[in-house]
Amino acid sequence: MGSRFSAMILTGGASSRFGSDKSQVLVGEYSLIENLLTTLPSEIDIVIVGPQLDKPSREVRYARESPLGGGPVAAIEAGLALIESEFVAVLATDMPFAGQILEVLLDNFPLLEDATIPLDSEGIRQPLCALYRSSALARAITELGSVQGQSVRRLIEILTVKELVLEPNLRRILLDIDTPSDLLAARNLSKESEVQGKVHDMEKWIDAVQKELGINVVVDEKMILDLARDAAHGVERKAAPITTFLLGIAIAGGADPKEAAKGIAELAGRWPTDT
């Protein structure tokens, strides 16, 4: 990705429908703007068009539209003055998960068109979660003439655009927060993403342990966790890791994993009556 790509985040909206400054509202552990900053690739340059942040989590540069409140096209023009890369992602701060589809936009960028713009679940273009050729974006702004109060829709009418239909699971990432109910939906989505991230981390841990041990076996997580739970509840807590260790020894000796786990679970269910 490197120096060919950068990102521009627009934070200067009035938030009139929301009722307060959206950029600082928390979704999960982070504010809207920090959700974007933490999900964008670490190697790309970022320009924020809007007020300076108190303590951003990474290095950013700032620009402001002139006059202030001149609208999104005026903000894009101000940000472009600091953009040196061939391609630039233009992202709205009220779409906190937008950074997660940047790689998809990159992978689908056309050879000839000026931009890749994803479609949301209703088939509507989302130009403030899109990837552009910087030179084409600058040319279009020049053609517009005055940028104050201009709509982004009018701007992209000048460009040649490739529309990108996303997979259903990615369309949810295009959620933009305009109202308190949108915020609730975003927080629920953040919780789901956190759970999915933990599942992915566990998969990576299992792969790493297998490489360390020089083995390659199918790991039935549910079976092992159920067995550990039964041992912890039926005997005592420290029985869980010891029991799963003994199961591993039995399997290594040729025992059938499911039958062995079933036998131990039944034993734990009868414990301590079998002593």
Image (cartoon, rainbow, N blue to C red):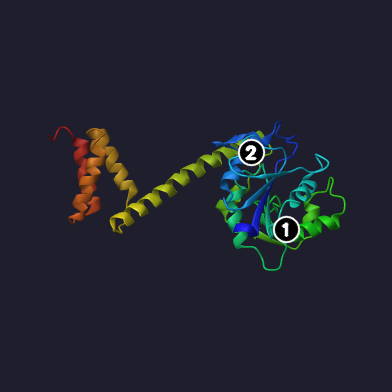
On the rendered structure, is 213 left or right of 33?
Answer: left
**Location of the N terminus (image quadrant):** bottom right
Q: Which residue is mark 2?
A: 182
Q: Position of residue 79 (x, y in %)?
A: 74, 49
> For the residue marked with disc 1, what is the amino acid?
Ser
Q: Is residue 265 visible?
A: no
Image label count: 2
Which residue, as the protein is rendered here, is positioned at the far bottom? 111
- Residue 146: x percent and y percent? 87, 50
Residue 228, relative to residue 217: is it above or below? above
Q: Are marks 2 and 1 in contact (CB under 8 Å)?
A: no
Q: Residues within 10 Å of mark 1 (few under 14, many from 20)?
A: many
Real-space CA distance between mark 2 and mark 1, rounded to the nearest whole angstrom: 31 Å
Q: Secondary structure at mark 1?
A: helix
Q: Amino acid at mark 2?
A: Asp
**Any mark on residue 245, and which?**
none
Nearer to the camera, 169 or 266:
169
Using the rendered image of the protein, determine whether residue 22 is visible from the camera's viewpoint: yes
- Give me the residue at 76% from left, 51% from top: 81
Quadrant where the image shows the C terminus: top left
Which residue is the site of mark 1?
A: 134
Between discs 2 and 1, the one toward the N terminus? 1
Q: How many other residues sit within 10 Å of disc 2, few (<14), some (14-19) or many (≥20)? A: some
Residue beneath the point at 37% across and 49% down: 205
Q: Residue 84: x and y, percent?
A: 70, 56
Look at the numbered disc 2 and give the secondary structure of its residue.
helix
- The picture places residue 28, in percent across and down from the top left corner, at 54, 37
